[in-house]
Image (spheres, coloured by chain):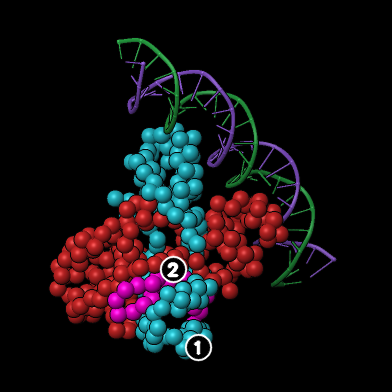
Chain colours: A cyan, B red, C purple, D green
Amino acid sequence: MRSPIHQPHLDDFDRKILAILQRDNMTPQRTIGDAVNLSAPAVQRRIKRMREEGVIRADVSIIEPQALGQSITIFVEVEVISETAEQIEQAKTEFAAAAEIQQCYYVTGEADFILVIIVPSMADYEALTRRLFFGNNNVKRFRTFVAMDRVKVGLGVPVG
Amino acid sequence: MRSPIHQPHLDDFDRKILAILQRDNMTPQRTIGDAVNLSAPAVQRRIKRMREEGVIRADVSIIEPQALGQSITIFVEVEVISETAEQIEQAKTEFAAAAEIQQCYYVTGEADFILVIIVPSMADYEALTRRLFFGNNNVKRFRTFVAMDRVKVGLGVPVG
DNA sequence: GTTCATTTGCAATTTTGTTTCATTGGAGCA
DNA sequence: TGCTCCAATGAAACAAAATTGCAAATGAAC
């Protein structure tokens, strides 16, 4: 379902451009060009290529959840009963579809899934658990961690 | 250290605009205006205001970690020994400073911190644990979860 | 009903993004 | 060496978008 990565070769220019874009993608191409010693059109072509290659996945605004009344961030470790391919796929689909689930990872270790959830209140979380976990008979157990401080939040990748 | 939120009143226009921007912040203001029934300048002024108020925290490109050779995503639950305000602050600062740590949350529950880490290889992770956890005598223990599939990744917030 | 503050749309202006095109700098090869 | 071919570049022209100025509309307080 996701577009493949064709092992793109990124040179130093590309990496510097990415470093700028993942900090502020509204930076004018001319400014980027000055920073990396390239003309604006060159920068523009590289960005376009990296978008096509899937190196740049998306361009988004990051919103403060509190401003939208979504003030609680919760982590959940979910352990399932049956780990057949089919059951796992179904769980992935279900978790991915929930708007409250901001992030979902399928992991090894003492849990099977780790979820990052954003809700307005604990009551909403409680309702969500009923729908998502207690309402799913393949969920063996789940552990909840409530975030008191979002110390560092982002999707930045080290550019090496 | 973080700018406060002055309980900004967001109307329906604002929320619709945010919904668009957190999906694609390169959408032209004119297009946004058409979608929400507002002129482009009106949209522009609202966006500017929400940036100043801190509702919109940042505008970024999202990069595929694999493209940068950072192909392993790891979750870590960290439990500390002493939870004095000072010790916690120090841990926050230390975790926030590490480039490999993409996200860091201070949580309640059976752990104190939850980290999302991006590294090129398990060897790099092992080196990181030595530096961050074994090298810190306030870390009681930590549990590692390696992501096999990044099912859903993003920082989108439900717009209610 | 009047006033005041806010927000809007339109139009002009400025800035930015995009395309065109001639040129440069190699890589491969006779 | 001298040659062609290819990919990437920068300068300039061009198109599109963002931003600003301003008058009109809206709405709340009095």
* Mark 1, other Cα within 10 Å: few <14 / some 14–19 / many ≥20: few
* Mark 2, other Cα within 10 Å: few <14 / some 14–19 / many ≥20: some
The three-letter code of the residue at mark 1 reads Gly
Q: Start and end of the magenta stretch?
A: A98-121
In the rendered image, residue A93, in percent from the top left (x then y), is placed at 50, 73
The reply to whether the magenta stretch includes residue B65 is no
Question: Residue A135 got which mark?
Answer: 1
The three-letter code of the residue at mark 2 reads Val
In the rendered image, residue A125, in percent from the top left (x then y), is placed at 48, 83
Question: Residue A84 got which mark?
Answer: none
In the rendered image, residue B36, in percent from the top left (x then y), is placed at 68, 61
Where C11 falls versus A78 (above or below)?
A: above
Give the residue pinned by disc 2. B151
**Closer to us: A20 or C20:** C20
Q: Is residue A154 left or right of residue A110?
A: right
In the rendered image, residue B106, in percent from the top left (x then y), is placed at 32, 75
**Closer to us: C5 or A98:** A98
